[in-house]
Image (cartoon, rainbow, N blue to C red):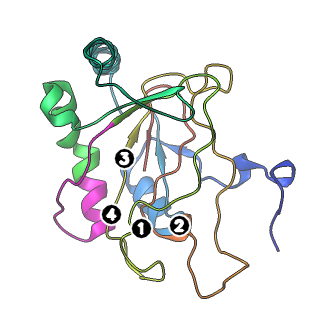
Amino acid sequence: MGPTTLAEIDLADSLPPIRTDVDDARADLDRYGVTRIAHALDADTVAALRRRTEEQAAAEEEAGIAFHDGGGANQRLWNLPSKGRVYRDLLTHPLVRTLARHVLEGDYCLSSHTANIAGPGGEAMVLHSDQGYAPRHLPIALAVNFMWMVSDFTEENGRYRLARIYDGESWNPELRAPLATPGVTVAAAEDSNLTL
């Protein structure tokens, strides 16, 4: 039986290593359901994404249409394809095309493209699956998430914190845990990494 409290969890032992090779990334997806890729974006792209995201967030705040969650500490930007070419370019990035087709076993459709600006003091998000519309025991992935890390993600600056990778649910062995499904996103990365 695995760890049961946050104090017992060693996340570093739960995630595959950060990769630079796409074949290793594919193997991680097959084995763990997650992969992390170092330096997936060049410095100019990271800078452009940061700049455009800051501009869009400020404009939505000024217009009174900003969406906040996490107790108000986080700001979400929805429908990114309509908000700049730098976001659309992520959708056709070679890693996205290669790894999405690998997980989904063919072509795919975009269902969501968003940004989350996580601020200090935000409330933890509940563990969830982004294919919650389907039975949890389904043995195939219907969705795959790409998470581009374009900021330093540290506890001090309020960024993502991954508490545990669940590989099963002890309360109901008939159900698969969200992170036991291939292609489900978890976040733990260095600057400009891609987590899938």
Image x and y of residue 66, in percent: 34, 25
Q: Nearer the viewer, mark 2 or mark 1?
A: 1
Q: For the residues marked 4 and 2, what is the alpha-carbon distance in whole angstroms?
A: 12 Å
Q: Residue at x 37, y 76 (%)?
A: 134
Q: For the residues marked 3 and 4, what is the alpha-carbon distance in whole angstroms?
A: 10 Å
Identity, as a three-letter code, of the amino acid under mark 4 = Ala
Q: Disc 3 designates what residue?
A: 146
Q: Dots 2 and 1: beta carbons under 8 Å?
A: no
Is 104 one of the magenta-colored residues?
A: yes
What label sits on residue 132 in the rendered view?
Answer: 1
Q: Residue at x 28, y 68 (%)?
A: 104
Residues packed near mark 1 inside 10 Å, few (<14), some (14 to 19) or many (20 plus):
few
What label sits on residue 178 in the rendered view?
Answer: 2
Q: Element at badge 4?
A: loop
Q: Is residue 159 above or below residue 177?
A: above
On screen, residue 170 versus residue 47, left or right, reads right
Identity, as a three-letter code, of the amino acid under mark 1 = Gly
On screen, residue 82 versus residue 114, left or right, reads left
Q: Disc 4 designates what residue?
A: 143
Nearer the N terminus, badge 4 or badge 1?
A: 1
Is 58 one of the magenta-colored residues?
A: no
Nearer the N terminus, badge 2 or badge 1?
A: 1
Dividing the picture into quadrants, the one containing residue 105 is: bottom left
Q: Which residues are magenta?
A: 98-114
Q: Element at badge 1?
A: loop
Q: Is residue 67 above or below residue 47?
A: below
Identity, as a three-letter code, of the amino acid under mark 2 = Pro
Q: Residue at x 78, y 49 (%)?
A: 10
Residues packed near mark 4 inside 10 Å, few (<14), some (14 to 19) or many (20 plus):
many
What label sits on residue 10 in the rendered view?
Answer: none
Q: For the residues marked 4 and 1, what is the alpha-carbon distance in whole angstroms?
A: 10 Å
